Image: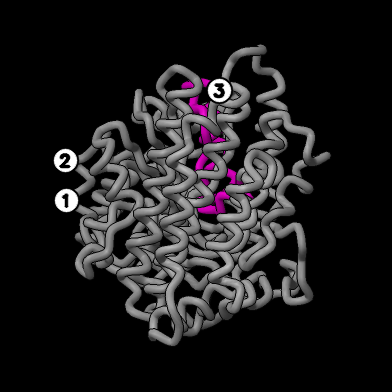
Amino acid sequence: MVASDYDDHDRAVVKIIEDACYVLHGTGDDFDPLMRAIGDARVVLLGEASHGTHEFYSRRAEITQQLIEEQGFGAVVAEADWPDAYRVNRYVRGALDDSDAEAALSGFKRFPQWMWRNQDVLQFIEWLKLRNAAVPRGQPKCGFYGMDLYSLYTSMAAVLDYLNRVDPDAARRARFRYGCFEQFEEDPQAYGYAAGFDLGRTCEGEVIAQLVDLQRRAGELAKRDGQVAEDEYFFAEQNARLVKNAEEYYRQMFVGRKDTWNLRDTHMVETIDALVRHLDRTRGGTTKVVVWAHNSHLGDARATAMGERGEVNVGQLCRERWGGQVFNVGFTTHTGTVAAATDWGGEVERKRVNYSIRGSYERLFHEVGLAEFMLVFRDTPRVIQPTIDQRLERAIGVIYRPRTERLSHYFEASVPRQFDAVIHIDTTSALMPLERTAAFEPEEAETFPSGL
């Protein structure tokens, strides 16, 4: 327990939060106030303060299940690669490709594998499969989709596989265009380095030509066999669009971070928009979607230091595109454990999360003294927003470096302007990867760090 080191003003702020928050008890009606606040929102963004925390994933799944069951949400869109997530989509909607959820998740092979191949996602996928199986014939089932753009080579393979089945001549043209990448041996960063520093010709023209070629024949290809053909065409078109955007992303990687960040988050929102329009058209209604991603993607960038650097993100772009139809929820924690790596490409480890530092939202929320609570800023904007505006906020991605935490994992933000609601879980635990390495020590074998 961290002793309180706040002054009278901060203690007054803690009391305001205590009076305004909803205490979460782990019961079925915990999130009813959140459901009321969400109302008729069409796009609900559910964040996470790390990519490896069990409670973030499990609470997010609980909220998503309630949105699907009670408010008719028809799609979950995750910070995951499009082709890998689409395999899960086929499974939860009744395709016979995979025998169980673990097999359906086996497409997630690249680092960080544990981000989607873990027990919490597995349980949600099994729940969604059973829920969809109970949907009456002819009624829409809830799907699971990805919106990220890292799957350059996997998406090229998916385009070629589709065209091989529907148009072998078009497949030969696509294979010739995508052959531009062959010399890089399926290493997109090697391509990005060569293209970014003018060490070889780029493949920009080829990937654009392939997308245009596919789109030009949309009407013919998508109408061959009703709904199934239209879904398959949409899957292929999204892969072709992803290849185009991923080529630009890797080409810009060695130029500047802002460019690649903005490209990636813009691609994510374009994917959400394309999916919503596709589902609206094929289902004949208004589709509501839940989006799963890190807080740094979903909290409005204009309320953070990111915005000051010229970066945009999914939260900002969604608000600009859908306005009041967007509702976003962030998560925070004070301490506990997390599944993360020390370096990019490294093994997943169970790491202790340092106590949150003074001056941060996490420490402020810890001082409230509750194990778990929720603040809905739309309920109390005049009370909460002015009193807790602008503090440090912690973000742990797939990498966690406790020794340099202040520099590596904190940034300036205004949580009440970032999010419409925030859920604080004071002590959290690492999620359980489906593949556990030797570095993933048992919980009881760890000792708590002394440094803050």
The residue at which mark 2 appears reads as 382
The segment highlighted magenta reads: 56-85
Residue 72, percent across and down? 49, 22
Q: Secondary structure at mark 3?
A: helix
In this rendered view, identify the residue nearer to me: 390 or 22: 390
Q: Is residue 31 left or right of residue 306?
A: right
Q: Is residue 263 above or below residue 270?
A: below
The residue at which mark 3 appears reads as 69
Among numbered discs 2 and 3, the one appearing first in the sequence: 3
In this rendered view, identify the residue nearer to me: 225 or 364: 225
The answer to whether one can see residue 124 in this image is no
Query: Quick check: is 131 in the magenta stretch?
Result: no
Among numbered discs 1 and 3, the one appearing first in the sequence: 3
The answer to whether one can see residue 234 in this image is yes
Residue 48, percent across and down? 48, 54
Q: Is residue 105 above or below residue 276?
A: below
In this rendered view, identify the residue nearer to me: 225 or 34: 225
Which of the two discs, 2 and 3, sits closer to the camera?
Answer: 3
Which of the two discs, 1 and 3, sits closer to the camera?
Answer: 3
Q: Is residue 366 left or right of residue 158?
A: left
Quarter of the figure with residue 96? top right
The residue at which mark 1 appears reads as 386
Q: Is residue 327 above or below residue 189?
A: above
Mark 2 and mark 1 in contact (Cβ < 8 Å)?
A: yes
**Residue pictured at 25% horizontal, 67% vertical:** 305
